[in-house]
Each structure stands twice: as C-alpha cells, then as structure tokens.
Amino acid sequence: MDGPLWTETHAPDLADLPQPEVRERLSRAVDEPMNLVVQGPTGVGKTAAVRALARETHADPGNDLIEINVADFFGRTKKEIRTDPRFEPFLQGRSRMAKRDMINRVLKESAANAPMSGEYKTVLLDNAEEIREDFQQALRRVMEQYHRATQFVIATRQPSKLIPPIRSRCFPVPMRVPTTDETIGVLAGICEAEDVEYDEDGLEFVASAANGDLRRAVLATQAAAVEHDEVTMQGAYETLDDVGNDEQVLSALESARKGELKDARSTVDDLLSDEGFDGGGLLRELCRVARSKSDASPESVARLHALAGEVDLDLSEGLDDRLHLTHLLAAWGAGRRTTERPVRGKA
C-alpha cells in the first residue's frame, strides 16, 4: 500500500476516541496521573488510545511516552535485543546478562530517566499478556520504586494473566469491540479528511467485514481507496476479497480435517503471533471461513460452531489461546467433542 498508513496519519486525539466510556476514564488520568491497565480484543485501539492520552498529558510526548512491546523481548534472541537501537544504550558491556536481567534493566532505566517535560513520563507495556510471571514480579518492584515520576500503562488482551499485585496497582480501562456505527463514523471522518468519495453501503460493508477490529477496518478502507479512488460497496467487496488472512485460516482448517495437527498448530501460531489475532478473533475467523470458503459439509460446519461454543468461555477467561484453538481443530478433525479439556502445556 503506497503512502503512510491511515492508522498512523489519522491517529485519534483523546476527544476523538469512539467509545465515550474510554474517553471518560482516560480523561481522569490527564488530571490525576495513575497506573492503568487498558484491556480489550485485538484491533479495538488500545495503543492508539494510550498515545492519545500521552499527547494530551505531555508537552513532549515523543520523549515522555516510552513504548515497549513485550514481543520485542520475549520473541527475540539476546543478540537481537542487545543490538536494538532502542535498548543498546542500556545494555552496552553486558553481553553475559541473562535475558530476564536485560529486560529488567531496560525497564528500570526507562523508568528511572527524568521526564523531558512536566513531572512524570508514561511507560507503555504493549501485548502484556506475554509477560512471564517472574518478570511480572520484577515489574511490580519497578512500579513501586518509580511511581512518583513514571506512569505505567499496561495494554493487554488478557488481563487475567496479570498477577494480582499488578492489577491492584492499576486503574482498569476496558475497551469493548466498537459497534458497526462507531466504526462507520471513524471511517467516514477519515475519508472526508482524505477527500475520498464514499457511500454508506461501502463503509458499512467494510465495518461489518472487520468484525469489530477497528485497525483492520481503517486499513481495508485505505486499500479500497487506493485501488478504486473511492469506497463503494463493489470496490470494497473486490478489495477485501484480495486481502486478509483467509488462506491461512483455511489452511489450518484443511490441515485439521486431514489429521495434520502439527501443520494446523503451526498455522495457528503464525496467526496469533505474526498477524495479531487474539483467541476470540481467530475463533470467529475459523467459523466464518469454514462457513464461506471451505468445502466442508453443512453438518461439519455446524459441528465446528458447536465446538467453538464449548471453548469460547475458556478463551474469554484469558486461558492459553494456542492450546485451546489447537484442541478445537483436533477435535473437529477427529469428529469428537471437546468436553475433555486439554491439559495445560499439551495440545
């Protein structure tokens, strides 16, 4: 896609966030700095909301908002962390340091540095559901030590994975899936700012197809505008048919039907870690693609939906996404129910 992404160029200000309850809770943090847990599904705008808060509260948000994506640590080797330009100044001469100690040092140094403007700075820990418990204990100590000059914001899809001492030190900011009308309102505002013609049917189609993922809706709208110079029902349909992750999702389903569980699990891993799905979002995609694009029989698709209902509660409670989705596909491929729950650590 040519040009800057609309998710960046049209990042919302605090007053523009589509969910009024989120605006209200974050506005309280402008006047009364506090640690926050911003929680919600993938794509609802958690990171964008925190950046909007930083622009509202800091005179120099470029320096006083420090973003640390947990995947930058736990999904990388020690060498990759040590040579990352963002972390290299903190880790010079410490090549023998264990990864846990490297992460802890970067966090402590980020929190210890004085704010560039005002009395405090903000440290955002994104995708915090990936933080191991031992590191969470270290994080708790850093939060206690530097609470006077640092506001910690933890963004996560699964707040239940945070240890109680951290949750008790943070004010919760739940972000729900935006309604179709809220998504349409955001898309219409962006199209008008970009001077792109659109019709209501086109925006409604994009918003419905995004299934509550606001980021996905904005990028799909941009793709349709680039390809057709407007956003109409027909243009959006043609564009969305060419983008997305349907082939990967279909591959996972087909692997499960053939009994190739290792391949299905690998594809689920890719969709969760590389494509940004959360468990609930990927569960919905599996059901949608099975219904609309696979050659599975109606009886087989109906059975998949029944199985999905059995594991949906586990996913909503913040349990292991990969484990339960792999178990779902294994059960579907084997033609059995999922009443026997998976043992944690096994698929």
Image (tube, rainbow, N blue to C red):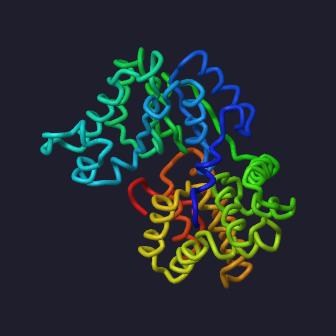
329 and 108: which one is in front? Answer: 108
Q: How many marks?
A: 0
Q: Residue at x 43, y 56 (%)?
A: 343
Q: Is residue 164 visible?
A: no
In the figure, 110 relative to 72: above or below? above
Q: On the picture, is 104 further left or further right than 51?
A: left
Q: Quadrant of the C terminus?
A: bottom left
Q: Residue at x 29, y 39 (%)?
A: 103
Residue 250, how many percent across, how many down? Answer: 59, 76
Residue 110, how many percent across, how many down? Answer: 34, 30
Q: Quadrant of the N terminus?
A: bottom right
Q: Is residue 292 visible?
A: yes
Residue 328, how many percent across, how many down? Answer: 56, 65
Instruction: Check the image and name the residue furthest to the right.
Output: 200
Q: On the picture, is 171 further left or further right than 140?
A: right
Q: Residue at x 72, y 65 (%)?
A: 225
In the figure, 173 relative to 70: above or below? above
In the figure, 140 relative to 309: above or below? above
Residue 118, how many percent across, how many down? Answer: 47, 17
